[in-house]
Amino acid sequence: MSEPTTPSVPPTPPVPLSALLAREDLGLRQIAGPPAPDTVIHWAHTSEMADPYPYLLGGELLLTAGVHVPEAAGAGTYFEDYVSRIVAAGGAALGFGLAPVHDTVPRALVAACEAYGLPLLEVPPRTTFSGVARAVWQLMAQARLAELRRVTEAQQSLAAAASRPDPVPSVLRQLAQRLSAHALLFAPDGTVIASAGRAPVPGTQEALRKLTAVVRPGSGTEPGAPTGTAGPADPARDAGPPGPGDRAAPADPTADRGRERRTPGPAPSGAGGHPATPPESAPARATPTPTSATDALGDTQLAAYALGGSSGFVLGVATRRREPADHTIASVAAVLLSLLTGEHQSGAGAARSSALVRLLLGAAPAEVAGLLGNGGRWLVVHARPENGTPDPVGATALGAALGSPLIDLGRDVVRVLVPAGREPAAQPGWTLGVGAPAEPGNWPSADAQAARALARARATRAPLVRHGTRPGLSELVPRADAAEHARALLAPLAAGPALTETLRTWLSLHGSWDRTAVALDVHRNTVRQRITRCAALLDTDLDDPDVRMELWFALRHH
């Protein structure tokens, strides 16, 4: 049976009520309820319904002018029932507009909000509800921008820390600094192998160690470990400060009225009212191990993150307060630590280092290829991000997605060497070009093929283009004869490599000036000038399909 769902909140940081009250242009005044710094708003909503419960999702600043209030409301329980329904729906605060219906906020409404702990704001006649809503969204946009800036700066500093001589301690120190936290790296056996940050409160390390059992594959929950409080990261708890609906309300039989419409009913019961058990023959579904978990130790917020490729390594983080961006920043650190601890655990990093040293000392690629973990053929992949230039973290994530740590981060392009048995797939946010499978001795040719495939992919706006490997007419001509013919035919262009590459790209894109310009990163007029120059040097008509076919054959063997 499904569990009751948490009220939805938008993917934007909440706005402290105190920030809205600080807007002098609105002139809002809090007249009841708990202090404003303890309340956050997720959105603003206007309603004149006597029962707004069915129309609230939780976290709203509900705005009303009191049109729904009957004349004798102050003498009965109208306002108490009204406020209790807002609190039951998870409303964050209530704004009451003065004029044209009411000159003052009803005293009974003030008393009800005070009793139920619901912040009550007085909205002056000069302030429109649309103006309040606009202010909420402006504050949300500012908070979102600040959050993105914080995440970006943290990502850059964590990536720089990962490139230092002591990468694991450096990443932990940088994470602890960014989150004002205590960060620990747990080994597969639960021991702490590195830590950084301010001294934690007593018991924090042991609580984090128990929490790691929740995210460590194949690890059972230890005696005394959190049960029910720690599990997959709770979106409501990860969203930062306490969310809507966490406020206690006075006991009221009407407080939960209508809630049955919004949450699933109880599980079916067996005899005696006990929960019904499934038949013994019903197969038990395996519960997947979560990648992150959260818990709390008093006022200290705990989080654990499984490191993907490290066979049991877990990152633990303890903070005094969980901010909206903390989860994202800690996840970036977890990815970097996954790569670092993965190399340490498998010894692959040492093997790649040996291969690099041997190449620098003069060994042939074929002699060191075995150290890279694959004795057969390889694929060269060229990748370019759709927006901006590649960065170390993005390049590392791309390599992990393609299944290879062999990455070369260039100024505009990331090159990845992938075992031929792992077929590259299109990656979101990237444009890929893949060369034909090649032995180590033919890697330079495969690299050139991948570069041309990437250029074609960018020109045709395809997410991935592979170098063609189908047998064709070229198989009928001996390779040496084809190469000699290509050298002779293209000899007039030998002095200008840019002309040869422009002609190759232009022919591959069926003579499109615009797409060729995109593929080569030049102006379309430059393409026209180069092709005109090629036609003059070759003394031929490039509009003739036979000429194009012969030139294409030659370029394929050049």
Image (tube, rainbow, N blue to C red):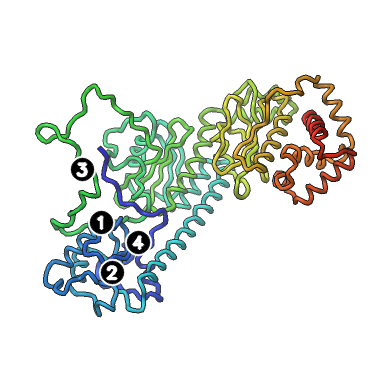
Residue placed most toward the observer, 557 or 222:
557
Name the residue carrying label 2: 64
Q: Give the image location of residue 89, x and y in percent.
A: 25, 56
Name the residue carrying label 3: 265
At x 51% / y 43%, what residue is drawn?
169
Determine whether the residue tagged by mark 3 lies in a helix, strand or loop.
Answer: loop
Q: Residue furthest left?
A: 272
Q: Give the image location of residue 465, x and y in percent.
A: 63, 35
At x 38% / y 47%, what residue is drawn?
318
Q: In the image, what residue type sits under mark 2? A: Thr
Pointer 4 and pointer 3: residues touching (CB < 8 Å)?
Answer: no
At x 49% / y 55%, what residue is drawn?
148
- Distance from disc 4 to disc 3, alpha carbons, whole Å, reads 29 Å
Residue placed most toward the observer, 226 or 240:
240
Q: Give the image location of residue 224, x and y in percent.
A: 26, 36
- Please state if 97 lies on the left or on the right of 482 as rendered: left
- Please tell me whether mark 1 or mark 3 is closer to you in this view: 1
Query: Which of the two discs, 2 and 3, labels the residue nearer the N terminus?
Result: 2
- Distance from disc 4 to disc 2, alpha carbons, whole Å, reads 16 Å
Quarter occupied by residue 3? top left
Task: Report the quarter where the N terminus lies.
Answer: top left
Packing grade of label 2 (10 A; few <14, some 14-19, many >=20) is: some
Q: Give the image location of residue 50, x and y in percent.
A: 21, 64
Packing grade of label 3 (10 A; few <14, some 14-19, many >=20) is: few
Pointer 2 and pointer 1: residues touching (CB < 8 Å)?
Answer: no
State the count of labels. Answer: 4
Name the residue carrying label 4: 41
Pointer 1 and pointer 4: residues touching (CB < 8 Å)?
Answer: no
Task: Report the quarter where the C terminus lies.
Answer: top right
Name the residue carrying label 1: 54
